[in-house]
Each structure stands twice: as structure tokens, then as C-alpha cells.
Amino acid sequence: MKHHAFGRMPFTVTNVGFGAWQIGGSWGDISEADGRAALSAALDAGMTFIDTADVYGDGRSEKIIADVLKTRGGERPMVATKAGRRLNPHVAEGYTKANLEGFIDRSLKNLAVDSLDLVQLHCPPREVFYQPEVFDSLDALQKAGKIKGYGVSVEKVEDGLKAIEYPGVVSIQIIYNIFRQRPDHLFFAEARRKNVAVIARVPLASGLLSGKISRETHFASDDHRNFNRHGEAFDVGETFAGVPFEIGLQAVEEVRKLVPAGATMAAFALRWILMSDAVTVVIPGARNGEQARANAAAADLAPLAADVMAATREIYARLIAPHVHQRW
């Protein structure tokens, strides 16, 4: 894995990090022991970036991270969390300084730290991006020492472009993968220009791009790939990257033909993301240590050839773009 600066912040991170949504919940039955093992394996492999959120298992993910890091000791990785989705209802009016500070205080306790490395607004409503007072509140919380920096996790490219107009925003987390290629146009160019860190999430399209899912695959009732298939619980773009399931399976079979001998499709999909120098860190999740080690190893794949990249763009344009490109 490569190490580089996290945008304008004084952190150095690996280009493959650990996405901690799975060890929190909404991915079926993953025990705390398996969650700890997955995170420990990622750290053993050298990963220096962890992404979580206060709502992942209602704090379970943050607490597992705190426990593992305390047990291991030594140099800490950068830990990014998120705030905002605890609001009920999740509306722009709830993004007050008092509410944000309350969420941050809770994460400080869960993560057992005095200051959060990075807090990200968690896919806030569109109106929030047009409320400077929200970002003023984050500036104040940073000045108070409760956070070292702040960014925004976004659903849409347009929201990412609006967010980085605020000078205090140091990072954007966005869905970017073979099935969601739109960020690699205007948004990535602007992020490079402003030295904004880019965190690429949903890199395997909720497992579709692992090549291991079929029409017969069963998803547990508490797995978002079951209960959010049509956006019933949150933005449908977070589940299978918003691609209709049958279309996704068809595209996977075409992508499979491009995977080099000896590589897994998952590793290929992660390496595809890392072909963009605008991506600071990609954050695949892992259910166990084996998956975490495989994610880390993906960075060692040779760069993908120009004709392979062109073929992935053709598959996207023909099969996937009509369903997702303008939506997100």
C-alpha cells in the first residue's frame, strides 16, 4: 500500500483503509469477535485509516475500534467518524451547533479520545450545503479542540462540489467504483485543485463487484442488501451502488472477463479505484480477517492497462450509466 498525505491535514494514510460499517451492523450477523478480528487484520496489514460513524450499530463500531486500538497500543491510525444521521427526523433544521456538539461528544466517548481526527457530516439533506452557519459551527468545534478537522460524506457529485466551496472542508467521502464513475469528471478535478482528500466508499458495490453474488444469494433480514434494495431505509445508492440487481449481475459477468489471471474480482475492482490519483483512500469493509487481508493486498496488483480501463468505461456507459449517472 502507498502512504500519502490526507489532503491538507497533518496525517499520512495508506491508500487502502478499513470501512467499519460492516462491523457495526446492517450487513447480517457479524459477531463482535469477527469485527475485532477483521480490524486487527487490517491494522496488521499496515492500514492507517479507519472510517466509521456514530450510527453504525448505534455506536458499536466506534466502541469496537476504541477497544481494539487500546488493546494494541502503539501508533494510532487516523480514525474518521460521522455525525448527523442520529437526527430523527433527519432534516436540515437539526444541523445546529448544539446537536452537532452532542453527536461529537458521544463519539469522543465511544472512541475514547479527547479530539476526533475527522468528523464528517453524514450525507446531510441538500439544504445543509446552503447553510453557512452549519460549517461555522464546525469551525467553532474545531477551534475548541473537539475535532481536528471536518469533511462531508455526500450522495451526489453536486453536493460534493458545493461542500468544497467552504474553506474548512478538508475531505469528501463519495461513492466511486466501476459502477459509479461520474466523480472522475469535474468533481475529482476540483478536489485535486483544492487539495481536498477523497474517501472512496462502496468500492465493491455492496459485494456485487466481488463476483461472489448470484441470483440465488440470500441476504439476511437485517442486511441492507435485503431491507434497502429499493431505498426503503436510506438512499438506494448505498445499496449495490444504486444499480438494479439484475443489471448489476449482467455487468459483473462482463467485468469478470477483464480480471487478470491470479487476481480476484474484488482486488481488481479496488485496484481500478486506485488508478485515479484523486482518490486519497478507498475504504472496503470486511466481515473477517481474511477479507481484510485480501483488501490490503489489492493495492499490490499491477496498474491496469489502458485497454482494460477503456473496457470498464464501455461497460459502464452501455449497461450502468443509464441507471445511475445523472442520479448521483
Image (tube, rainbow, N blue to C red):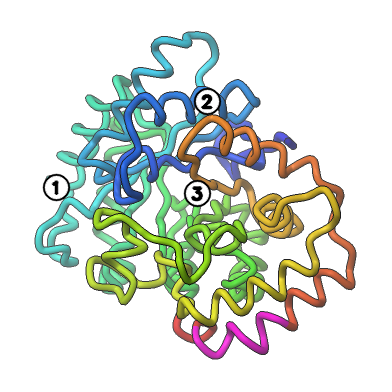
Q: CA distance from mark 1 to mark 3?
A: 21 Å
Tell me which numbered mark, 3 or 2, is placed earlier along the sequence: 2
Instruction: Using the image as rendered, state which of residue 52 and residue 213 is in the foreground.
Output: 213
Q: Secondary structure at mark 1?
A: helix
Q: Kindly identify which residue carries mark 3.
A: 170
Q: In the displayed structure, does residue 141 sit left or right of residue 46?
A: left
- Label 2: which residue? 77
Is residue 318 toward the left or the right of residue 94 in the image? right
Residue 303 at x, y percent in the picture:
85, 53
Residue 132, x across and y down, in percent? 29, 63
Q: How many marks?
A: 3
Viewer-proximal residue among 150 and 314: 314
- Main SS class of the magenta portion in the image: helix
Q: Residue at x 67, y 73 (%)?
A: 253
Q: Nearer the viewer, residue 186 or 300?
A: 300
> In this figure, which residue is indicated by the disc labeled 1?
99
Residue 189, percent from left and from top: 67, 68
Count neighbours of disc 1 (C-alpha within 10 A) and say few if under 14, some if 14 to 19, many if 20 or more: some
Report crowding for label 3: few under 14, some 14 to 19, many 20 or more residues within 10 A (C-alpha): many
User: Which stretch appears magenta?
Assistant: 315-323
Q: CA distance from mark 3 to mark 2?
A: 18 Å
Query: Looking at the image, is mark 3 or mark 2 nearer the viewer?
Result: 2
Above or below, 132 relative to 288: below
Select label 1 or label 2 by which is in front: 2
| Residue 312 image position (x, y, % from top left) | 74, 74
Q: Which secondary structure, mark 3?
A: strand
| Horizontal arrangement in the rendering, residue 193 relative to residue 127 (left or right) | right
Q: Real-space Cα distance between discs 1 and 2? A: 27 Å
Mark 3: amino acid = Val
